[in-house]
Amino acid sequence: MTKVTFSSRGGELLSVDLLGHAGYAEEGEDIVCAAISSAVMLTHALLFDVQKIAVDTVIENEGAHIRITLPQGAGLARGQEALLALRMHLTELEQTYPEFLNVMEVHTDAAD
């Protein structure tokens, strides 16, 4: 199962953290994993390459872990729509494949 955690504070999304393989099918044939990966790649390209927001990106192949964190300041505000769209897309995908994808949001009051 892929676990997706969006972190937010004060109504703003701060980051998205994805961990694990979906497990829908064998590697290379897993349509759920492909959909998740494609959505994350598109979101990263929008934030980093198109909007030129200096996101902090962690990619660890071991354990299938990806984290995208928006920077504080103007980049945080400018990146909201991209993370909101990703959250909406993954939440809809979760409704279709609940055994393979779990999406949640963690709210924090503390400053990072």
Image: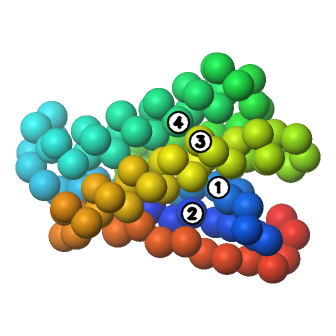
Residue 93, position in %: x, y?
28, 56
State the SS at label 2: strand
Residue 39 position by quadrant:
top left
State the SS at label 3: helix
Residue 98 position by quadrant:
bottom left
Residue 107 position by quadrant:
bottom right
Residue wearing tag 1: 15
Residue 34, position in %: x, y?
25, 39
**Circle 4: residue type:** Thr
Q: Residue at x 15, y 44 (%)?
A: 30
Residue wearing tag 2: 6
Viewer-closest of 45 and 12: 12
88 relative position to 82: left or right? left
Marks 2/1 in contact by CB < 8 Å: the verdict is yes
Q: Earlier in the sequence, mark 3 or mark 2?
A: 2
Where does the N terminus fall, quadrant-wise? Answer: bottom left
Q: Earlier in the sequence, mark 1 or mark 3?
A: 1
Residue 26, position in %: x, y?
9, 45
Q: Residue at x 48, y 56 (%)?
A: 87
5 relative position to 111: left or right? left
Where does the C terminus fall, quadrant-wise? Answer: bottom right
**Circle 2: residue type:** Phe
94 relative position to 51: left or right? left
Category of crowding for the residue at label 4, using alpha-carbon neighbours closer than 10 angstroms: few (below 14), some (14–19), many (at least 20): many
Q: Earlier in the sequence, mark 2 or mark 1?
A: 2
